[in-house]
Image (tube, rainbow, N blue to C red):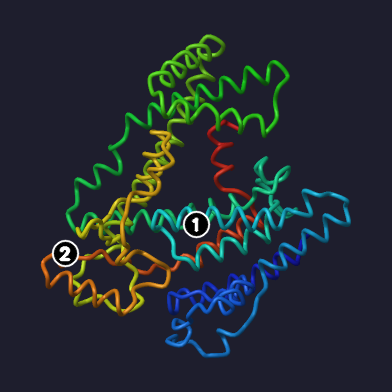
Amino acid sequence: METVPLILGLLAGVLTSYTDIKTGFIFDNHAFPTLTLIGRLLGWEEEEEEESELPTWLGRIVIPAAEVGVLYYLYRGIQAHDGLLAASGLIGLILGFILGLLLYYIGAWASGDVVVLAAFSALLPLAPAAADVVPPYGTTYPLYPLAVLFNSILAVFPFIFVYSLAVLVLRKRFHALREVFVGGLRTTVEFTLWIVAVITVQAIMGSAGISSPITGILVALVLLPVFMRLHHLGNAAGILSLGYLMYLDPTVALLTSGRVFVLIYLLKVLLSTVRFMRVEVLMEEVPVEELNEWDILGEVIHEINGEVMRDREDGLERIKRTLVSWDPGSLKPRRGRIIASPTAEGLRKEQIEELKRLVEEGRLENSFLRKKSMPFAPALFIGFLMAYFWGDIFWWLVLRVAGL
């Protein structure tokens, strides 16, 4: 049993979870101390640590989880003369950062959560021997950080779901409730057809002797963006594929398509809940007088050609639009001078003063979205432990859908 990743993961998980719950702040040196060193060299400010209610000594503890993960797999790879294994820790670290930054970009995470996921990803780039439910991307390739992320989200989803529904009911946001369960059903059906088409192509390739985990992933990566761009083509391919599967075995075809639909519908409910939670639960609308230093905005205030504008678009919607339009430029909307935005360091005093001035001049409405802090480090810790001792929840669901 790989005890080194487990020990470092336990230490980093306990400390980051405690400080996140206690203060809403995560110290980089509790998971990735190299970032602390880089920050000091670049002159990053550390006001959060100074204002913390935690004992000073606690913030000075160093847990080199990310660094040890990279070195641990480098050592194992050199011993085994395996270049991919040697690079696994570094690949996991990079993948963890990419996944975390994606969630940070859509407004679901704080910067500290990105650091924690990156550290856990460096410790578990590959599935450990203790895990029972292991996806193909966790053994052959160092993509097991996906399991840590999926586990973290799915482990807390029931609590998030119930809490979000309670908030929506109490606020009588019945339209939002309807959107969570009913909205986007057509897209769900279409996506089911597209997945059926992908499964059929994979099955045909398998019968021709062309079958491997990476091949299946590549088929999905090629076909799904095309179907998202050309809906009618995707729907036609899905219907023809379903008809072909029905011809081969109606029972298996109906069970497979039904399970795919249920899985996609659950994912749709998850994403809808996260989107509405971001707006209805994790955000609050406050006047400029209630904004304080270090508060994190939920919108971008910017100025173009003398006109002050605000952008409240959900990053998830922007990504969806980019995938549909095939226009990477839409990921970064046109903006002028940024006055204030949802940065990890929060609002500065000068920014608040400028926002007050703009409100007094009538150039900006006195209503601002402010993010509420929600500790996610404990969820990441749970996801790490589940990935280590049990496996990948998402892959387990995929296997259940496939009837395996």
Amino acid on which the number 2 mark rests in the picture: Leu
Residue 383 appears left or right of 273: right
Alpha-carbon span between mark 2 and mark 1? 30 Å
Residue where numbered disc 1 is placed: 101
Which residue is located at x 20 percent, y 69 percent?
286
Disc on the earlier residue, 2 or 1: 1
Extreme-top residue of the structure? 247
What x and y, as percent, mark residue 402? 56, 31
Residue where numbered disc 2 is placed: 364
Residue 296 found in image quarter = bottom left
Which residue is located at x 76 percent, y 65 percent?
3
Disc 2 is placed on an element classified as loop
Is 109 located above or below residue 147 in the figure? Answer: below
Is 247 located above or below residue 137 in the figure? Answer: above
What x and y, as percent, mark residue 25? 46, 75
Residue 313 appears left or right of 82: left
Q: Nearer the viewer, mark 2 or mark 1?
A: 2
Extreme-front residue of the structure? 305
Which residue is located at x 11 percent, y 66 percent?
362
Extreme-bottom residue of the structure? 56
Amino acid on which the number 1 mark rests in the picture: Leu
In which quadrant is the C terminus drawn? top right
Disc 1 is placed on an element classified as helix
Nearer to us in this view, 349 or 298: 349
Residue 41 appears left or right of 124: left
Marks 2 and 1 in Cβ contact (< 8 Å): no
Nearer to us in this view, 209 or 304: 304
* Neighbour tally class for label 1: few under 14, some 14-19, many 20 plus, Cα within 10 Å: many
Is 238 located above or below residue 271 in the figure? Answer: above
* Neighbour tally class for label 2: few under 14, some 14-19, many 20 plus, Cα within 10 Å: some
In which quadrant is the N terminus drawn? bottom right
